[in-house]
Image (cartoon, rainbow, N blue to C red):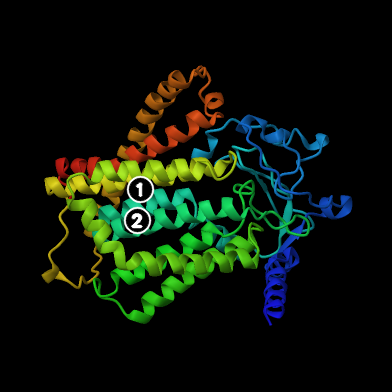
Amino acid sequence: FKMGLKSVIQHLSDYLEDPYKVAKFQQICGIDKSPLQEAEGEPKDGPRQRRGHPASDCCKNGLRNGVLPPPPEHAGRGAACPSPGEEEEGYAGAFQKAEPAGGETTSARRKNSLTGEVGQEFRVRNAFLYYLFTFGTELGNELFYITFFPFWLWNVDAYVGRRVIVVWVWVMYLGQCTKDLIRRPRPASPPVVKVEMFYNSEYSMPSTHAMSGTAIPFSLFLLTYGRWEYPFMLGLLLALCWSSLVCLSRIYMGMHSILDIIAGVLYAILILVLFHPALDLIDNFNLTYKYAPLIILSLHLAMGIFSFTLDTWSTSRGDTAQILGSGAGIACASNVTYVLGLMPDPPLDMLPFTPVITMALFGKAMLRFLVGVVVLLMIRAVMKKVTIPLFCKMFGIPCGDVRKARQHMEIELPYRYFTYGMVGFGALFVVPCTFKYLNLF
């Protein structure tokens, strides 16, 4: 019986991990290989390679996660190794224009500006689904996090925002660590079309996009229902739509198999079940305990050091340091703002809140958001100027070329941790102080 059950599980796993299922979904949604690829054919995948080299060697690693580097004749079209640090500009400059072929929309190729991996040319037969799933995948990317979380903290409900960020940090941290333990490669290409390449050098299972795309909307739903006045079914439906859009977008982009998505969703649900009952305890500790900032910083540093020992260097290391730094900064800032009485939570007798949106309220919210973003960008710029030369001096690495210096793990990881730690601290302390000074509360 045990052998039979094991065989069934293995068969189901192989079925859900089949890259041809991903390719079939892409075809149904209107993604095809470009005519050039179909004519020339493509080499079969090789194994994924992760090496402990700096990012400057990224173009010398040969096969990476099932995708061969572009042949020499295409080297002039973005195949050269770029300078690290460009990832902070998000995807700016990552698209290259291509002419429509045969009356259909031919998508540009998207590349990771840190690793130098370039995507494939492909045709889009359904522009609506392309833009819908592009939006869906952005709901799990850095640009969304650095706009959504601050906006929620400043304009909606800081009480809920602090707790959701705790969930987000743990979900992303555990997801990245689990990826490095399981070490499953991305879906093979071919047959899959790599619509997105930005995270292609990372491992695949579980999908951290699916994890955050499940944890964030459902934790928001659980934390706001009863605190804010809205229909239960509306909140549940919005959470389901958000989660489904993110999950399906990762299959559409060719980044994950069906099994990766299912594993990510179930893993996120497990983390929510374990952490949701403890959120009040964690938040109260962060707010009220005298030595909370010291413990928070020590815990997040220890978590980072542990995660960096699980596997060799990859671009996900910087992302993990950035998430831990942001979480530590926001948690420390919540303690300071509580002690100073800067952003007190509304009394319980005001609950439940009734959403009333007026033009004046909307205008003030947008003004707060714009002022806050400017302050955060200034903090980030100052920290970048200070931390990189400091760590270069500490580790004996030349800092004349900042981008080249950041190719070293010793520089990139502490830079990301401390810079985004200060950005997180600024989001919940410096920015509210600015609002108070400008009378924007």
Residue drawn at (50%, 56%), measured in percent from left and top?
175
Q: Position of residue 235 (x, y in %)?
A: 37, 75
- Mark 2 is surrounded, within 10 Å at the Cα level, by few (under 14), some (14 to 19) or many (20 or more) other residues, namely some
The N terminus: image quadrant: bottom right
Q: Position of 164 compared to 237: left or right?
A: left
Q: Is residue 305 above or below residue 184?
A: above
Residue drawn at (69%, 54%), measured in percent from left and top?
194
Q: Position of 57 compared to 267: left or right?
A: right
Q: Are marks 1 and 2 in contact (CB under 8 Å)?
A: yes
Answer whether residue 122 is visible to the viewer in this image: yes
Q: Position of 36 compared to 302: left or right?
A: right
Residue drawn at (15%, 55%), measured in percent from left and top?
344
Q: How many marks?
A: 2
The answer to which of marks 1 and 2 sits earlier in the sequence is: 2
Q: Outermost residue, front direction?
A: 2
Q: Is residue 86 above or below residue 211?
A: above
The residue closer to the viewer here, 153 or 301, is 301
Q: Position of residue 177 (x, y in %)?
A: 52, 51
Q: Position of residue 319 (x, y in %)?
A: 49, 44
Q: Amino acid at mark 1?
A: Gly
Q: Please name the residue that numbered disc 2 is placed on.
A: 166
As helix, strand or loop, the secondary structure at mark 1 comes to helix
Which of the 4 quarters of the picture holds residue 2? bottom right
Q: Please name the residue that numbered disc 1 is placed on.
A: 327
Q: Is residue 233 above or below residue 166?
A: below
Q: Position of residue 52 (x, y in %)?
A: 63, 35
As helix, strand or loop, the secondary structure at mark 2 comes to helix
Q: Residue 87's mark?
A: none
Q: Amino acid at mark 2?
A: Val
Using the numbered discs, state the Cα–Cα distance from disc 1 to disc 2 in whole angstroms: 7 Å
Answer whether residue 372 is visible to the viewer in this image: no
